[in-house]
Image: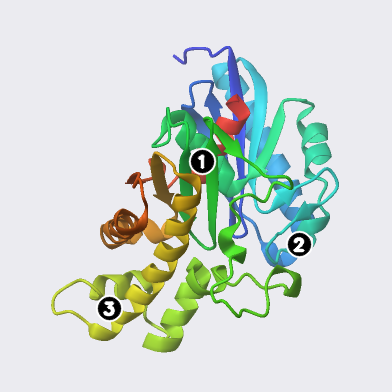
Amino acid sequence: MSVPVDDFVLGIDLGGTKIALATADTNGTILYRQTIATLASQGAEQAIERTIASGRDLVEQTQRRWHGRLAGVGIATMGITLDDRVLMVPNVPGWDRLALPSQMQQAFVLDAIRIENDVKAAACAELRWGALAGVETGLYLNLGTGIAATLVVNGRILHGTHGAAGEIAYNLRHLHDEQGFSAGKAPLEEFVGGGAIRERVRLRFGAEATVEEIFRKATAAPLDPEARAFVEATLTEIAFHLTNMTIALDPERVVIGGGLMRSKALILPRLAAHIRRFVPFPPQVEEAHFSHDAGIMGAIALAIH
């Protein structure tokens, strides 16, 4: 027999490939969950319509079994969400024209709706339950399809004036870089974002090669010199930008998550060593607690908050 819950929340993780949804109690324990395809080529509106339908179904299912009421909705999403549009979004047709706050408030008849950038949402989960819990000054680095960071100051996420703090995808890589955000370029992400790494692997090692395979060949015996050089160039670039951020922020802990951390045995020691070498007061460097469910747990943390 199910034990009733007083309140529960709905978390939604809106991604370019898939959308994850889950209901959870106010301690963050997931009750029901579902994943649907984004179908990005068919546009943003259909993705949001199907998300709302799936979310309502999960809410009804949760109420039938666990009773209680929906107390909040948290949404982790791409880009920076404003009332009437979304900035800095990937290539999902129409996503930039979404009015997400009003759409979600109408769909769930609820004022307690919080929408946050997906990487900042993941940092929320780490702050509440994970590797950043209790940290006053910290840094969360996401090495996923893209690359982005979240800065934690006074135990809270730093958004910046326009919500774009930590968007290091747009960092310049060279002193004489000519193109950046205004030209539609993201210089750092175009080299070390997960998609960019996959493309560089394909071009250098062949269509069948995978990122994990090349990272493994970089350290496994017998050592593959070409794979080693490729991985070293990639990690050196990441380490350079991470170290400079660490010097600027002076955090007590650096937490690293994202899909590239499947190769954590190589990545973590390499980045930690670079930080120890160059940062005046080197912080702890740790793997994120939520390595697989960062998006949905971030959305649930937002809803509870």
Instruction: Give the mark nearer the N terminus: 2 vs 1.
Output: 2
CA gap, disc 3 to disc 2? 40 Å
Residue 24 percent coordinates (x, y): 53, 27
> For the image shown, how many numbered marks are present on the structure?
3
Q: Is residue 36 above or below residue 62?
A: below
Q: Which residue is mark 3?
A: 228
Label 2's element?
loop
Residue 290's quadrant in the figure?
Answer: top left
User: Residue 123's mark?
Assistant: 1
Q: Is residue 229 left or right of residue 203?
A: left
User: Residue 25's mark?
Assistant: none
Please state which amino acid type lies under the numbered disc 3.
Answer: Arg
Label 3's element?
helix
Camera-nearest residue between 83 and 133 = 133
Q: Which residue is mark 2?
A: 43
CA gap, disc 2 to disc 1? 28 Å
Instruction: Give the mark nearer the N terminus: 1 vs 3.
Output: 1
Please state which amino acid type lies under the numbered disc 2.
Answer: Gly
Asked whether residue 35 is in view, the answer is no
Residue 229 percent coordinates (x, y): 31, 81
Please state which amino acid type lies under the numbered disc 1.
Answer: Ala
Camera-nearest residue between 38 and 102 = 102
Neighbourhood count class around disc 1 (C-alpha, 10 Å): few under 14, some 14–19, many 20 upward: many
Neighbourhood count class around disc 2 (C-alpha, 10 Å): few under 14, some 14–19, many 20 upward: some
Residue 160's quadrant in the figure?
Answer: top right
Residue 304 percent coordinates (x, y): 59, 25
